[in-house]
Image: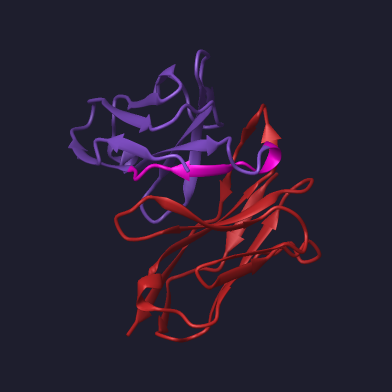
């Protein structure tokens, strides 16, 4: 079946530190991969996505590369800010199932950035 | 991108009662989805709701417990029936953006969620 495994949190870093949140997946076929972010008290927002192998998604200084050989989609940022404190979810979509995208989420990683 | 609102934003309910959550979108969408996010857990898809047809439920979720309505292309409701403390969760609706890249890689947008506490 389809599944997503994320690095366990919580993760606490100092401002300007380098961030990596690991994400690996299991899927049949060629899924699309996503990172969603949930800021305190808010709903999920799409952070970035990649739809095929070797694609790199990027947004707000965050990057993730779709690695089919290692079935991974690790999230990175070179210099984090306090405002990046949130819960990050890795997700995959296996493609259309009965005409719909059905997202499969990882367990989420809570990130706290200290000034 | 679609703008999604949910009502109520939060509620505290007694066990055995039911709560109906509303999801309103600012544009017409074909697919709407309902998710549950239990405390400290990830999101789990409850069901997919198409306008004019019965909702499609995921394994572990049944219509009697989570009846869904989808009367038009901009609105849906999810009812949590005969609630127990185990139903305490955040319930989120999402929609698929057909104006995105199209086809296989449509983007999903999420509402702000409804935080439900059952005593």
Residue A36 appears at what percent x and percent y? Answer: 50, 56
Q: Outermost residue, top direction?
A: B52
Q: Colour of chain A?
A: red
Q: Is residue B86 left or right of residue A4?
A: left
Q: Colour of chain B?
A: purple
- Above or below, A89 against B23 in this view is below
- Above or below, A52 against A23 in this view is above
Q: Is residue A114 left or right of residue A53?
A: left
Q: Is residue A59 left or right of residue A94?
A: left
Frontmost residue, A2 versus A18 = A18
Picture quadrant of residue A4 = bottom right
**Which residue is at 18% across, 33% downward?**
B14
**Which residue is at 52% across, 84% downward?**
A18
Residue B111 counted in the magenta span: yes
Query: Which image quarter is the C terminus of chain B in?
Result: top left
Q: Which residues are magenta?
A: B103-113
Q: Is residue B21 left or right of residue B99?
A: left
**Which residue is at 66% across, 28% downward?**
A99
Frontmost residue, A76 versus B1 = B1
Residue B26 appears at what percent x and percent y? Answer: 39, 33
Q: How many marks?
A: 0
Q: Is residue A103 visible?
A: yes
Residue A9 appears at what percent x and percent y? Answer: 46, 70
Residue B12 appears at what percent x and percent y? Answer: 18, 39
Picture quadrant of residue A16 = bottom left
């Amino acid at each position: 079946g389809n599944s997503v495994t994320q690095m366990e949190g919580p993760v606490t870093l100092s401002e300007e530190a380098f961030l990596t949140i690991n994400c690996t997946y299991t899927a049949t076929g060629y899924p699309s991969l996503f990172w969603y972010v949930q800021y305190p008290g808010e709903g999920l927002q799409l952070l970035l996505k990649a739809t095929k192998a070797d694609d790199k998604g990027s947004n707000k200084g965050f990057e993730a590369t779709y690695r089919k050989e290692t079935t991974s989609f690790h999230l990175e940022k070179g210099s984090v800010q306090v405002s990046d404190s949130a819960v990050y979810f890795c997700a995959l979509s296996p493609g259309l199932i009965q005409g719909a995208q059905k997202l499969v989420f990882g367990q989420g990683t809570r990130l706290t950035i200290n000034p | 991108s679609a703008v999604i609102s949910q009502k109520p934003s939060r509620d505290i309910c007694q066990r055995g009662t039911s709560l109906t959550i509303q999801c309103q979108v600012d544009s017409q969408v074909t697919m709407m989805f309902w998710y549950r996010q239990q405390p400290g857990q990830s999101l789990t898809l409850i069901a997919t709701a198409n306008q004019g047809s019965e909702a499609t439920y995921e394994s572990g979720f049944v219509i009697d417990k989570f009846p869904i309505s989808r009367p038009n292309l901009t609105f849906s409701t999810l009812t949590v029936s005969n609630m127990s403390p185990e139903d305490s969760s955040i319930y989120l609706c999402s929609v698929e953006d057909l104006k995105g890249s199209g086809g296989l890689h449509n983007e999903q947008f999420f509402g702000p969620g409804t935080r439900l506490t059952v005593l």
